[in-house]
Image: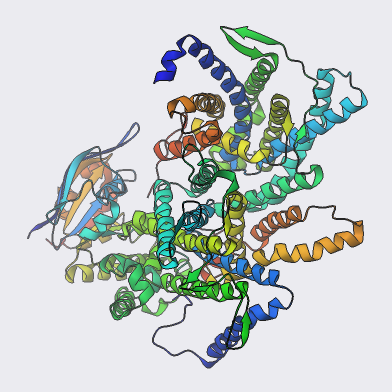
């Protein structure tokens, strides 16, 4: 059996202690990090968004084995849906319990729409087509401002409503129980809750009839069909679920940032998320989370380290830090594929699959 | 469609103009597509980084031409471009060869997913190296070409366009000759058919694959030169779109098929030119020509769904 | 006995090659039905047509009263026709038990909601799936290997695992493509006993095999294909004596076998 937490049997004490420890760390993390400045808490929040995205893409790439290079499109759909329904752009200000499900549902729908034509395609072609779809969405987002202004073009939509539960808004700082919570800190707990929810769903899916069907398709689609699995529907399900998580993340992004524009949804982002999944350990939930945190934190870290270092050495910022970040991404991808193709923290199955020479098909 | 009726007198000229533009662009696509199709045909890899090799060719040519013009503002176009090519072609060949040797060769037996991701990684590396070396801004190609403009049946065709089409055609003919009438070409075709058996027959697979990358990269350098002289600019991101479209052309023609890559390139160029030229009319002004890039994607998706073997490819089934 | 599968006029081409031409036969419930012929005769192609992996140009096939032709492959399994493959197609990187559990997919129902909520019904179903899978592994004789990685199993065990996986779909007809290939004599005896057990437990068997001793000893009816056409159909003993068959395929070696093996079951 795969290594999820078993159902009926009790958890060993060591695992319980470990979970409790992690829980404590997570609970106080924003305050600890906040000491270095609120911008770091915001970075932490973005890392959580990337964890959501990575977990979502992991369903498509890791569980079902479908190489989606245009995943960012669903993030965009979720974000723009929130933006359109909760900002001055159309004058709509719907409450969260309406927009969030709508964002998720529309993203899921796009997942099915974009996934449907790709079902018969082989690995490489599937990748290119999904890449194309991602780009098409971005082009439409950039240009759907005439004749009817839907997306407001390259300028994007701003003054988006923050996340509000009734009168409790996440945007402002407040004090409860004597502790002062800033806006970003509040968002942290909200995002953390959503991440934990997504995590639970993913873990349960992996260890279920559907999860096994995805594994079967990844291993040998023809044999899977012969055993009665409706591969078309099961693949679409993977797309839909992955997309809906992307949509959820997108909606939270729009609410938190207050502003969306097509720039945030480029191919580079799709590839970054793919990197997180692949480098962390495709199909292995803990590995994927690790990958997301590493790759989300790295650019900020680099910026904090590389800029002063360049000032020291060159006297000015000579090399574009964004360039260095992406260069390292690219290097990391090549190096990991050459030396550790199953990822930094792979699952046992994946290690077997990618052991050189006996590899299964892509 | 009201527009077509009103400008009936001009419509033939406009149409012809689009065809000419399309064929020019298509020739460039064809040259780049050849690189994709050769590599895919022989090792089954979509070389994501190929478009970026084109970009490097364009950047190098632009920089060399720029420095030459700086040194001698009266230098002739032939000298400037020739010198640029003399530098760009070897540079691109080195880049292509290195990528294959370092990143792709070790993964020849690995699952396709690993090779694909590596190719994406190489592409990112090349793009960002270019950005770090040459900056984010557009580099302009120096004004050294004064093309003559001819009028044919009301449409304008410039000397540069003619040069591009003719040179591309000559290169395609040369490549076809190499592939069908030289030992290297035969070795390449054999390797594409069945790598292991070709190896057993005494063909040095590594040499053949390196040759494919070298030839493809050389063609990429020339294509990059064409693009930068035609549009007047070069920038580190230009490889992506161009590469994607050229790959679409290769798929359209039938991946792995050289004639298909050429046909696909020309066809895609024409489709794109006609599409962006007429899209305003066709959609009553709703969609404008900045949707131009979408055409290539639509073609790609349509081909892969309805006729994945392309126009000239063979249909291959799956044996259970 | 009732007819379980009835095929008529099946034809399949691949470009210039006519792989099957006007193939018709019927399998009755309780048969162990053999499909033999020289290499390239179209046996696996026929399997692929029956299981809808290939679409025939013409011909029909009915199975348990339902039309089989034109169905999607997963529907075929749903109707009760399961198969194994000539070149074993296991889910290699998964364990043996996981392979068989995947075979249970089609007879179970838990979807996303059930997976996420882990409600009582889902948990019951999961427990049943696991128990059933263990039972099937025992049934084919590899129960001790439940947690072993499928691709690391010895060849004979892999073949048996594939059978267990197919049985997990609760088939009415089990189609085996060269199950004895690569097996030695003692493994073949074990296989023969397994197939008989499967038939005795109510599952009809369709069998492609080259091992003539196995076919003649096991099957009660045999179909002979050559170059995509039906050469003969009938009881093994009759087919053996058919001059066309002898000429095309069986030859002197099998004639000797016919002398040593007592009359095949009717």
Residue A21, horizontal then vertical, whole percent: 60, 87
Q: Is residue A37 left or right of residue C42?
A: right
Please tell me which residue lies in front, B86 or B64: B64
Question: Residue B255: in sight, yes or no?
Answer: no
- Which residue is at 61% across, 72% downward? A183
Q: Is residue A359 left or right of residue C37?
A: right
Above-or-below relation of B206 to A207: above
Residue A196, horizontal then vertical, whole percent: 50, 75
Residue B207, horizontal then vertical, whole percent: 70, 39
Above-or-below relation of A345 to C204: below
- The colour scheme used here is rainbow
Please tell me which residue lies in front, B161 or A194: A194
Above-or-below relation of B112 to B279: below
Q: Is residue A124 left or right of residue B204?
A: left
Q: Residue furthest bottom?
A: A13
Above-or-below relation of C8 to C221: above
**Viewport quadrant of the N terminus of chain A:** bottom left
Please tell me which residue lies in front, C12 or A157: A157
- Which residue is at 58% across, 75% downward? A186
> Count of labels shown?
0
Task: Indicate the quadrant where residue B2 lies.
Answer: top left
Question: Residue B90: in sight, yes or no?
Answer: yes
Residue B259, horizontal then vertical, whole percent: 54, 26
């Amino acid at each position: 059996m795969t290594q999820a937490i078993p159902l009926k049997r009790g958890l060993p004490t060591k695992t319980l202690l470990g979970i409790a420890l992690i829980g404590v760390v997570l609970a106080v993390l924003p305050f600890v990090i906040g000491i270095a400045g609120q911008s770091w808490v915001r970075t932490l929040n973005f890392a959580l968004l990337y964890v959501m995205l990575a977990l979502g893409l992991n369903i498509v790439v890791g569980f079902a084995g479908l190489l989606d290079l245009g995943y960012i499109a669903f993030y965009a759909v979720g974000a723009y849906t929130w933006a359109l329904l909760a900002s001055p752009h159309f004058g709509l200000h719907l409450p969260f319990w309406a927009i969030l499900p709508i964002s998720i549902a529309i993203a899921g729908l796009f997942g099915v729409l974009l996934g449907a034509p790709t079902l018969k395609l082989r690995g490489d072609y599937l990748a290119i087509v999904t890449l194309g779809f991602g780009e098409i969405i971005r082009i439409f987002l950039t240009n759907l401002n005439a004749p009817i202004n839907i997306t407001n073009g390259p300028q994007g939509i701003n003054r988006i409503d923050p996340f509000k539960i009734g009168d409790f808004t996440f945007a402002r700082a407040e004090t409860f129980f004597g502790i002062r919570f800033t806006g970003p800190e509040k968002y942290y707990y909200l995002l953390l809750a959503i991440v934990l929810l997504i995590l639970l769903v993913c873990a349960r899916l992996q260890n279920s009839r559907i999860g096994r069907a995805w594994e079967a398709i990844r291993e040998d689609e023809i044999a899977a069909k012969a055993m009665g699995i409706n591969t078309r529907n099961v693949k679409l399900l993977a797309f839909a679920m992955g997309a809906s998580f992307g949509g959820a993340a997108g909606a939270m992004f729009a609410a938190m940032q207050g502003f969306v524009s097509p720039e945030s949804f480029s191919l580079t982002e799709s590839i970054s998320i793919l990197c997180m999944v692949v480098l962390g350990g495709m199909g292995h939930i803990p590995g994927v989370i690790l990958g997301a945190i590493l790759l989300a934190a790295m650019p900020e870290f680099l910026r904090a380290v590389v800029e002063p270092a360049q000032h020291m050495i060159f006297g000015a910022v000579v090399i574009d830090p964004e360039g260095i970040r992406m260069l390292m991404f690219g290097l990391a991808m090549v190096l990991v594929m050459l030396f550790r193709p199953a990822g930094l923290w792979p699952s046992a199955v994946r290690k077997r699959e990618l052991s050189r020479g006996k590899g299964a098909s892509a | 469609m009201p527009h077509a009726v009103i400008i009936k007198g001009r419509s033939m000229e406009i149409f012809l103009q689009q065809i000419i533009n399309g064929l020019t662009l298509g020739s460039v696509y064809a040259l780049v597509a050849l690189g994709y199709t050769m590599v895919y045909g022989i090792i089954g890899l979509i070389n994501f980084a190929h478009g970026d090799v084109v970009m490097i060719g364009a950047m190098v040519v632009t920089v060399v031409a720029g420095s030459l013009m700086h040194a001698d503002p009266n230098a002739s176009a032939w000298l400037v471009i020739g010198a640029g090519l003399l530098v760009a072609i070897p540079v691109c060949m080195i880049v292509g060869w290195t990528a294959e040797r370092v990143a792709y060769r070790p993964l020849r037996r690995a699952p396709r997913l690993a090779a694909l991701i590596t190719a994406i990684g190489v592409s990112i590396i090349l793009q960002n190296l270019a950005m770090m070396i040459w900056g984010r801004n557009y580099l302009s190609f120096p004004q050294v070409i004064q093309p003559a403009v001819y009028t044919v049946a009301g449409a304008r065709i410039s000397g540069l366009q003619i040069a591009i089409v003719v040179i591309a055609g000559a290169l395609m003919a040369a490549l076809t000759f190499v592939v069908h009438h030289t030992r290297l070409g035969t070795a390449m075709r054999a390797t594409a058919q069945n790598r292991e058996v070709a190896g057993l027959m005494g063909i040095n697979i590594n040499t053949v694959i390196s040759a494919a990358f070298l030839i493809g990269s050389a063609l990429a350098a020339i294509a990059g030169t064409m693009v930068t002289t035609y549009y007047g600019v070069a920038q580190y991101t230009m490889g992506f779109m161009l590469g994607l479209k050229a790959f679409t052309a290769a798929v359209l023609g039938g991946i792995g098929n050289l004639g298909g890559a050429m046909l696909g390139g020309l066809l895609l160029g024409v489709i794109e030119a006609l599409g962006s030229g007429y899209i305003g009319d066709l959609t009553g002004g709703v969609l404008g020509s900045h949707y131009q890039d979408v055409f290539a994607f639509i073609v790609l998706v349509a081909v892969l769904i309805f006729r994945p073997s392309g126009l000239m490819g063979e249909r291959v089934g799956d044996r259970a | 006995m009732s007819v379980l599968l009835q095929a008529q006029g099946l034809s399949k081409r691949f470009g210039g090659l006519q792989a099957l031409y006007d193939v018709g036969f019927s399998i009755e419930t309780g048969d162990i039905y053999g499909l033999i012929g020289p290499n390239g005769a179209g046996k696996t192609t026929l399997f692929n047509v029956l299981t809808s992996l290939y679409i025939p140009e013409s011909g029909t096939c009915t199975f348990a009263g339902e039309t089989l032709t034109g169905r999607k492959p997963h529907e075929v399994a749903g109707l009760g026709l399961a198969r194994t493959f000539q070149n074993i197609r296991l889910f290699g990187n998964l364990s043996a038990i996981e392979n068989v559990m995947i075979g249970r997919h089609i007879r179970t129902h838990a979807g996303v909601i059930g997976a996420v909520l882990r409600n009582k019904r889902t948990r019951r179903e999961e427990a049943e799936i696991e128990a059933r899978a263990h039972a099937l592994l025992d049934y084919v004789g590899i129960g001790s290997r439940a947690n072993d990685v499928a691709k690391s199993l010895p060849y004979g065990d892999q073949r048996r695992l594939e059978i267990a996986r197919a049985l997990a779909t609760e088939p009415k007809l089990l189609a085996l493509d060269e199950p004895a290939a690569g097996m030695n004599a003692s493994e073949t005896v074990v296989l023969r006993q397994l197939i008989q057990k499967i038939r005795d437990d109510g599952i009809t068997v369709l069998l492609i095999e080259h091992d003539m001793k196995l076919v003649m000893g096991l099957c009660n009816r045999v179909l002979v294909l050559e170059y995509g056409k039906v050469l003969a159909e009938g009881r093994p003993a009759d087919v053996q004596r058919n001059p066309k068959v002898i000429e095309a395929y069986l030859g002197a070696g099998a004639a000797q076998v016919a002398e040593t093996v007592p009359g095949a079951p009717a």
